[in-house]
Every structure is written in structure tokens, then in C-alpha cells.
Image: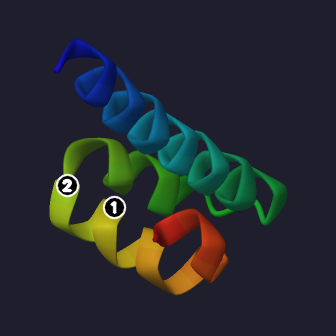
Amino acid sequence: MCEIIERITTEEINKINKLNAILLKNKRYDDLQRATEDPEFQEKLITELLPKEFID
């Protein structure tokens, strides 16, 4: 059970890190700030910006 939770957590952290890298690279600082405060907005950006293999 702990192994599953750890894997899920690692996958979520990787998604957020990838999103943050994309936002920084594109100088989308306002979106980065908002994503740290608004989980729904963060999920929207993940869906829009991350390659499909990162989302599944």
C-alpha cells in the first residue's frame, strides 16, 4: 500500500515540476503564481500543456 501511495505521490510531483518548468521557460510567471494557489487552474494547465504521456 505504501509503495502505491509513494508512486502516486512521485508521479504527481513530477507532473507539477514539469508544468512549472514549462511555465518558467515561457515566462508565464502569473500563471505559475496562480497555479500555486488554485488547484483547479493547475490541473487545467497540466491538461493543456503537458504531453499525454505525463498525464496518464
> Which amino acid is tagged 2?
Pro
Quadrant, the N terminus: top left
Residue at 32% in and 19% down: 3
In the picture shown, does residue 4 fall above or below 35? above
Q: CA distance from mark 2 to mark 1?
A: 5 Å
Figure quadrant of residue 39: bottom left
Can you name the residue that lies furthest to the right here? 25
The residue that label 2 is drawn on is 39
Crowd tier of the residue under label 1, counting other residues whose Cα lies within 10 Å: few below 14, some 14–19, many 20 or above = many
Q: Are marks 2 and 1 in contact (CB under 8 Å)?
A: yes
Relative placement, left or right, of 32 versus 44 is right
Relative placement, left or right, of 35 versus 27 is left
Residue 20 percent across, percent down from the top left: 60, 47
**Residue 42's mark?**
1
Of residue 50 and residue 5, the one placed in the foreground of this image is: 5
Figure quadrant of residue 52: bottom right
Residue at 59% in and 40% down: 17
Q: How is the image coloured?
A: rainbow
Residue 11 percent across, percent down from the top left: 47, 41
Residue at 18% in and 66% down: 40
> Which amino acid is tagged 1?
Gln
Q: Report the number of numbered marks.
A: 2
Relative placement, left or right, of 45 versus 3 is right
